[in-house]
Every structure is written in C-alpha cells, then in structure tokens.
Amino acid sequence: MIEKLRPFATLFLLLAFVAPAVAQEDTDRHEQLSDPVVDAAQDPTETPLPSDGLVSAIDDPWLKAFVEEVLERNPRVARAQAVAEAAGQRAPQVSALPDPMVGLTLFLLPPQTRVGPQQVAVGISQRFPWFGKLNLREQAALLDAAAASALVEAIRLELITEAKRIYFDLSFLDDQQRIIGEDRATLQHYEQLAQARYASGVGLGQAVIKIQAEITRADTRLLEIDVRRETLIASANALRDLPARSLVLVGPLPAASPLEDKIENLRIVALSHRPELVAADLRIESAATRIELAKKDYKPDFTVGLNYGFVGQRSDAAGEAFPPEGNGDDNLSLSGAINLPIWRKKLAAGVEERIQRRLVADEEKRALVAQIESGIGDQSSRLPLLYDQLRLYDNVLTVQAEHSLLSAESAYAAGTLSSLDLLDAERVLLNVRIAAARVRADYAIAIARLEGEIATPLTNLPREEEDR
C-alpha cells in the first residue's frame, strides 16, 4: 500500500515546492511594478475625474444639462467604456495556469507486462510557465486596461469641448438673429420715413429702393442663420444620440474675463491632468513589462503528469499455472517534461520587437506633450487678443457707432442728412454689433478649448500653481 502511495506523495511534494516559488516570484514582481500612477489609473474612484470638474464649473444651467446629456448618451463614450471593460477581462485570462490535460489510451493490442496485459491508460498533466511569466502577463494586461480607462476620460474631455463649441455657436446665432431682427424693424421704420419724404417731394426714390434692398438682405441673412442653426442642432443631437431635429435649449454667451495665468503654469496643470498622458505612461510601462516577459521566454516551461494504467490478469498457460506476484495489479507513474527554447534567433527577435514597441510608446508620449504644448500656446496667445478686441468693440466701436447713429437721426430729423446717410450709419452699427457678438463667441470657445487642453476649469486653478 505504501509503495502505491509513493508516487502521489512525490507529486504532492513537487507541487508543494513549485506553488510557493511561483507565488513568491509573482509577489516580488507585483511589488516591483507597484506605482501610484498605475494604482490611481486602475481605480479611478480614488481621485475626481477632470471631466467632472469641467462639468461642475459650468454656470449656465442649459449648457450644463446639454454637456451632461452628451456625456451620458454619446456612442463614442459608450464604445470606449465597453473597450475598457473588455480590456479589464484580459488579466484573469492571462494570469491563469493553462488548462490541465486529461488523456485516455485504449490498447487495441494490449502490451504484455510481467503482471498481465495493459488494457487502458489514463493520464492527467499540468503545464507550469516559468516563474514570473504569469504575473508579467497579468501586469501587462492590467496596464493596458488602465490605459483604456484613461482614454475614456480623454474622449469625455474632447466631447465637452466640442459640445461647448456648438453651444456657443448656437448662442451667437441667437444673438445675430436678434440683432438682425432689430435692424430689420429699424429699416422698416426708415422705409416709411423715406417714402413719406419721397411722397412730399423732398427725398429721393433711390433711398426707398436701397432701404428695401437692405430689408431683403436682412431676410436673406435670417434664412442663412436658420440653415446654419439646423446644421449645428443636428451636430448637437448627434453628440447626444438624439433625432437630428430635437430641441436644443441655448442661453446667452458668458461674460468675458481676462486670462491671467502664464503659459508655463498652464503647461504644468495640463501635464498633471491630461488623461492621455496617463494612458501614455501606462502604455510605456506595459511595453517595459512585455520586454521582461520576452526575456522570460528564454526560460523553459515545465509539465508534470500523473498516469494510471489498468492491467488485466495474465491468461496465458504459464501465468495461470504459476501466477506472478501482483498478478493483474494496475500501475501508476509520474512524468515530467520541459520545453527546450533553443531557437535563440526567434527569442532575440521577440525581445527586440518589444524594445521597439517601448520606443514607439515613448515617442507617442513625446508627440502628445508637444501637441498639448502647441494647443496651450495657440489658445493662450489668442485669448488676450480676442479679449482686447472685444473690449475695443464694447467700449469704443459700439459706443461710437451708436453716437454716430444718434447724430445721423438728429440731422435727418433736421433735414440736413438724407435717408442714405442715415442708412449708412445704421449699417455701421449693425456690423459692429454682429462682429462684437462673434468675438464674444470666439472668446468663449477659446476658453473652452484651453480648459480642454489643461483638463481643468480656469476658475478652479490652485493658487499655488498660479504663483509658482
């Protein structure tokens, strides 16, 4: 009995030796790869998301509701989240041992053994990768999953910026429509005055015709605004996955405030908040982990097997006359095997491939940093110019145009100016008001894009970063 149990004891001792060794190797590797950036990316609930900060900083309730609906319903976000969820399921797969193999052999021509013919053999085997391979595969999969989760946040930030752009363009169209509508009402009043003067023989018929042409032009511009609005509404509804003609509620353009932060301060904020950079760092770490995994391919995997053979009793004359000791006893055997990684050129190519992929990840991050710095520089240089332009329109040009129109109306009432002169003064004020509204919208869009570049609301920048 003891002799039959000896193979089981041997197998137990072997597994008792291998399992702790593999576990210790995996624990050491896990501690080596432990990093706060990786841990935060793998558990995003630890820190608030940049997109949540941008949404919470929105003061306009209609804009906030629109952005929240976009983030909730957008197909790109849903797809990216599904990709991240799928990537998260890779780690349990690659970190598990290979499936054990069970084999069955039926001997059609049973080989004769000393104690009888061997009829059936049953075996089970388990392959064990070299120490640390499973953990390296798991770590690489976890890093890839964390990078995929970070890219979900990057898409959310991109959608917030795009939603704000569409919203502010729609708000500008509302302002433009209101300004042109008011101008059209003024033109109709001027037309009545011009017709009255023409009827009394004081004015010219040309003034009446030109004012009517301007009214027609205003009608055309209102139609163009309607066409442009329908296009923007369709784009807005595509972002939130609604029918193209669904209603979009729009409020007024926000008040403009000067940009006080330096470019270097904004760069520091962007490099610490942009989720694309987190994803890039995770991809670099994943590539480094795969280099170590490729180096492990130089080490062999090993397989342990247990086989049980069913033996029948001897039926030959000699066996029946003088049955041997243990006649018909089954046999039990323990087997072991390793693969031989002898094709060194293939293994070296695998390591070199992963080294090059690590270089690709490094260059991708470098290009991303350059892109972020370019975006910050572009928007931060445009914003002061737009703000000065807006102040010029609000504080100088609009005031001058209004005073010019008032003077023209007074001179027209006194009979010293014609209807055409009055019309020219009105055209100047119209163009100034529309241009001011356009600059105000462009400034709001530039602010939205800059906040998207740094992944942080400008109003929420910490004081220490501003003064650094």
Image: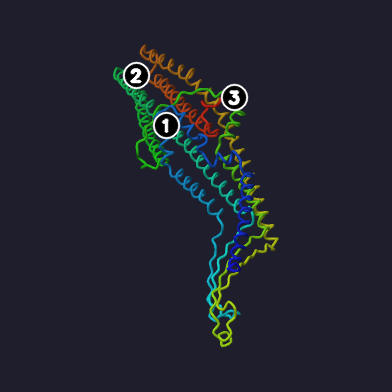
Q: Quadrant of residue 410?
A: top left
In primary-sequence order, the first of circles 1 and 2 is 1
Residue 303, numbered label: none
Q: Quadrant of residue 325?
A: bottom right
Badge 3 density bin: few <14, some 14–19, many ≥20, Cα 10 Å: few
Contact? badges 3 and 2 (CB < 8 Å): no
Name the residue: 37% across, 19% down.
Answer: 419
Front one among 80 and 391:
80
- Label 2 secondary element: loop
Image quadrant occupied by the N terminus: bottom right
The residue singled out by tag 2 in the image is 203
Front one among 452 and 421:
452
Residue 220 appears anywhere in the view: yes
Dot in front, 1 or 2: 1
- Label 3 secondary element: helix
Badge 1 density bin: few <14, some 14–19, many ≥20, Cα 10 Å: some
- Label 1 secondary element: helix
Dot in front, 1 or 3: 3
Image quadrant occupied by the C terminus: top right
* Image x and y of residue 200, in percent: 29, 17
Contact? badges 1 and 3 (CB < 8 Å): no
The residue singled out by tag 3 in the image is 464
The residue singled out by tag 1 in the image is 64
CA gap between label 1 and label 2 equals 53 Å
Is 114 left or right of 208, judged from the image as shown? right
The amino acid at mark 3 is Glu
